[in-house]
Image (tube, grey):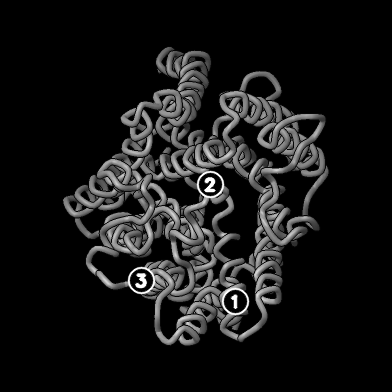
Amino acid sequence: MAGNNNTAKKLTLVPLILMIFTSVFGFANMPRAYYLMGYAAIPWYIISAVLFFIPYAFMMAEYGASFKNETGGMYSWMEKSVGGKFAFVGTFMWYASYVVWMVNVAQTIWIPFSNFIMGSDKTASWHLFGLGSTQTLAVLGILLVLFVTFVASKGVEKITKITSIGGTAILALNFVLLFGGLFVLIANGGDFAEPLTNVKQAFIQSPNPSYGTPITILSFLVFAIFAFGGLEVLGGLVDQTENAEKTFPKGLGIAALVISVGYAVGIFACGMFTNWNEVLSADTVNMANVAYVVVQNLGFQIGQGLNLSPEAAITMGEWFARFAGLSMFAALTGAFFTLAYSPLKTLIQGSPKEVWPGKLGEIKNGMPLNAMKWQAAIVSLMIGGIVLGGDNAKELLTLLVLMTNVALTIPYMFLSAAFPAFKKKQLAGQLETPFMVYKSQKLSTIVAIIVTLFIGFANVFTIIEPALNGDMFKTIKLAAGPIVFGSIALILYTRYEKKYVNKKDIKQNIGA
């Protein structure tokens, strides 16, 4: 009878699919993709799903199944597959991606806040102490980092409930986008706001002049890969799934299909009510605020479809923007509090404690307090350094988004590159194997190479594209994060090896 109770608590197919969907699917990815590439984003999302998302998802499932009793997460996966140094560098890069994420969100979180309070993005007109708008957002961002670090160090159980409220509201936004788009399409007699007179051209050529060359188009792949991110957390769901050998691969396959189709449909829906040249070509629109611009336009178009007066339609658009702003602000605030300590704590607990100099690796009251203080200082310095590099708000926000995309996708390469070594041990019977999707070493190696190269090429094109257009400084800034953080990880682990690992080996040899 006890077994039945445990089974009842486990995930069945539909709840599993929903958990995967909510972990991966992001609303803002669709308006952003439409802003960059129009309908032409859809083929690249499909290519990314086939060459990255679906094969990578099954890799994560196999890792999670074999290491379901390990508490170190991705560090344990890579350490037991390849080795300690590879695992530490890969996990440190994963952690560093959240540092870059905090640098980005600390400044861009004020855009949803402005939409919530004012019904549109007014951050370009914000000024504190005589500073320009970009410096003002930087000051607010640094204050937010310091505040979050202070509160998170005391415990954030209640505050993180904000995340679930925001998550539910964002889920509602997805339905508003789709059904609102259909309503506008019907109200306009079946005419798309972004015309489909030449279907072939529409799905190949971007309306955005900044994405008109082969290199810029290929650099767009990073956005598609980023949109499918978050799969690392799925490995932990394997042991929570009923009849995991059959249910988990099936659930993952269905969820991958639903997410891939969902993104394609969502991008297509943006064209139902948003004419690119009329709505998105203005200098005030950027990658950080485009989601709110699109939602505001949706509200306005619905108002017109309901035959409201122009003033009432504008007001309706503002309330749509307020809803989107509140949803995203709540979700990002909750995520910020969690990510201020969670990745850092995972990295410190997963890696050897001797890696960390001084008291950096100490955990007090369940929190890495000393490391959090250093983290806050580094994030604040990075915000200040990036802002000092230029005053153009649109360029700055674009840079922040690109930096985040690069930082968050590079760690995926470590996990996919480690997969052949993992498979070799799995096939040799050295690892627990509840189920296998890739049943041969050759297939596993081929898939791992394809996924790793796909992510690598996408990031290379993203990093070099500004340099090819004469902006070498931007390329340096995009490459600096991975290079600096990767170097820090290597220095820390090499120091640990020389100080501890080599001494242990010598002692063991003497003892023998």
Q: Quick check: 338 above or below 496?
A: below
Q: Quadrant of the N terminus?
A: bottom right
Instruction: Identify the mark at residue 491; answer none if there is no mark.
Output: none
Which type of secondary structure does the marked residue at label 2 adopt? loop
In the foreground, 351 or 298: 298
The residues bearing labels 3 and 1 have C-alpha atoms spaced at a distance of: 50 Å
Do labels 2 and 3 touch, CB within 8 Å?
A: no
Q: Residue at x 66, y 83 (%)?
A: 308
One can see residue 14 in this view: yes
Residue 174 percent location from the top left of the image: 54, 72
Q: Name the image quarter holding residue 169.
A: bottom right
> Where does label 1 land, which residue?
9
Relative to 19, 512 lies left or right: left
Instruction: Identify the mark at residue 195; answer none if there is no mark.
Output: 3
Relative to 364, 422 lies left or right: left
Q: Quadrant of the C terminus?
A: top left
**Amino acid type shown at disc 2:** Asp
Q: Residue at x 70, y 32 (%)?
A: 132
The residues bearing labels 2 and 3 have C-alpha atoms spaced at a distance of: 22 Å
Q: Quick check: 41 above or below 18?
A: above
Within-10-Å neighbours for mark 3: few <14, some 14–19, many 20+: some
Instruction: Identify the mark at residue 283; answer none if there is no mark.
Output: 2
Q: Residue at x 49, y 29 (%)?
A: 481
Q: Residue furthest front?
A: 310
